Amino acid sequence: MPTDDQPAGASAHSTTRDDLFEAAERLFAANGFQKISVRDITAEAGVNIASVNYHFGSKDALLLEIFRTRATELNRERARLLHEAIGRHHGRPPVREILAALFAPPLRWFYASDRKRTSLQFILRVRTEGTQPMRDTLQGDVSHLTRFVAALRTACPDLPDETLYWRLHFCLGLIHNNRIADFERLHRLSGGSTRAIDAEALLVRMLDFAEAGMRV
């Protein structure tokens, strides 16, 4: 119900916008960006076809809004975990805990049974299907990674900067490669022996590999 200082129309405006946002995220995550039309989105949301342009300006602007919102949420979780690790270790967290803060949020979103799984699927699609503004944002916004670089410098003081950056890049590749299609390929290669795994077990395996790589 609207509050005394919030007109009734404002509540309806917010609900329609949220419905469009969530419907578009579900459809794009499941089907890809090119296959979904504005009409598909408004039908899924149960609103007027003109609503996308009214609330977001265009389909591409809606895509960019979803990406920015979810990427910000994900990176805030990473920042919180890193901050906690820094606090636990009086400013000098070990490599494994730094990498855990980087890896854990996307892994847990991937295995979630709620909206977060859909959000991660959407984010992963951006890397291969994103519009130019989305790719520009992905490539240009590295501010969330600078705190990880600073923590890794403290944990690995003898590692040259260039080497540290390359190894962080390879660590990020571990996250980007953990998609359903890649798992299916691995399961076939292993004869099914890799199927019994959950988010926390996968996190341990990734950390074992990445921590060793950072310390070589």
Image (spheres, rainbow, N blue to C red):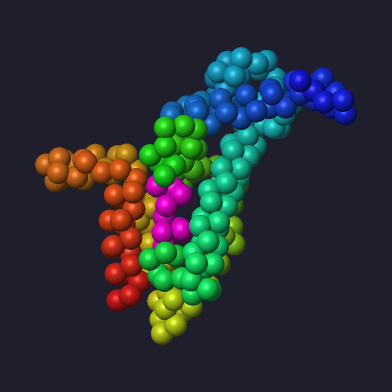
Above or below — where is 90 with respect to 195?
below
Above or below — where is 14 with respect to 86?
above
- Which corner quadrant holds the N terminus? top right
Q: Residue at x 32, y 39 (%)?
A: 180
Relative placement, left or right, of 137 versus 212 is right
Q: Residue at x 71, y 32 (%)?
A: 57
Q: Quadrant of residue 155?
A: bottom left
Q: Is residue 31 visible?
A: yes
Q: Is residue 75 visible?
A: no
Magenta stretch holds residue 28 = no
Q: Quadrant of residue 37?
A: top right
Between 210 and 89, the residue placed more toward the observer is: 89
What percent of the width, then of the height, locates residue 123? 49, 43
What percent of the width, then of the height, locates residue 26? 50, 28
Q: Residue furthest left?
A: 191
Between 43 and 195, the residue placed more toward the observer is: 195
Above or below — where is 85 with respect to 199?
below
- Which corner quadrant holds the C terminus? bottom left
Q: Residue at x 61, y 14 (%)?
A: 46
Q: Quadrant of residue 60?
A: top right
Magenta span: helix, strand or loop, mainly?
A: helix
Above or below — where is 102 with respect to 113?
below
Q: Residue furthest bottom?
A: 158
What percent of the width, then of the height, locates residue 215? 33, 75
Q: Residue at x 40, y 47 (%)?
A: 107
Between 54 and 81, the residue placed more toward the observer is: 81
> Which residues, given as a range, are shown in magenta?
99-107
Number of marks in the rendered image: 0
